[in-house]
Amino acid sequence: MKLSSVFTRVLEPKSVAFAHCDLPCGIYDPAQAKIEAQSVKAAMEKYAASTDGDFKSRAVAVKEERSEMVKHHLWVLWTDYFKAPHFEAYPQLNTLFNEATKLAGAGGTKGTNDVAVADKLIGKIDEIAEIFWATKKA
């Protein structure tokens, strides 16, 4: 018997475990995206209420930074937490994520100070969260 086949047999796992996420459950939560989206909305409201040009510039910078963080948190959920069985059970999930990340992008909250856009983003995150929590119960 070849030495390499002995090592292969010895090192071969006796059983294989499968997980639906990268680390044990409990690290993913759509609340992270929602908190950032609420910060985006608050920055928009502060922008609208101010007449100070410097303050408005800072509000826009914060809004854009937080919008990017929303996209990051959504992408992590979309690509790391949700797996094929989730997308089969909830066929609208890809569309929800696509719409939400676009609402957090240049065509959404990064490109406007319209609070209604932030409200739409928060609504999409709430829809994603509802599905997320349903999958956690399953």
Image: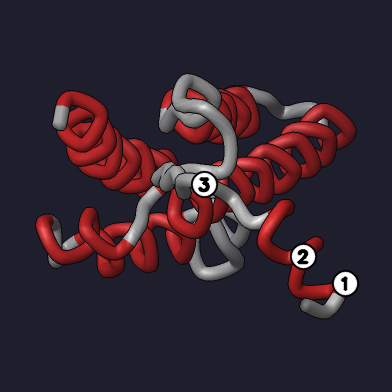
Task: Check disc 2 and give the amino acid type.
Answer: Val
Q: Earlier in the sequence, mark 2 or mark 3?
A: 2
The x and y percentages for residue 112 are 55, 56
* Residue 95 placement, left or right of 89: right
The numbered dot on residue 132 is none
Residue of label 1: 3
Check the image and name the residue furthest to the bottom.
2
Give the vertical position of 74 relative to 1 (above or below).
Answer: above
Query: 67 or 135: nearer the eye?
Result: 135
Residue 21 shows in the view: yes
Residue 48 shows in the view: no
Disc number lying in front (2 or 3): 2
Residue under the image location 59 percent in, 50 percent down:
13
Give the vertical position of 134 relative to 77 (above or below).
Answer: above
Disc number lying in front (1 or 3): 1
Give the class, few, some or many, for how many residues have Cα within 10 Å of label 2's Cα (few <14, many ≥20). few
State how far apart marks 1 and 2 are (Cα): 5 Å
Q: Are marks 1 and 2 in contact (CB under 8 Å)?
A: yes
Dividing the image into 4 quarters, which one contains the N terminus? bottom right
* Residue 93 placement, left or right of 27: left
- Dot 2 falls on a residue whose secondary structure is helix
Task: Check disc 3 and give the amino acid type.
Answer: Lys
Q: Quadrant of residue 17?
A: top left
The numbered dot on residue 6 is 2
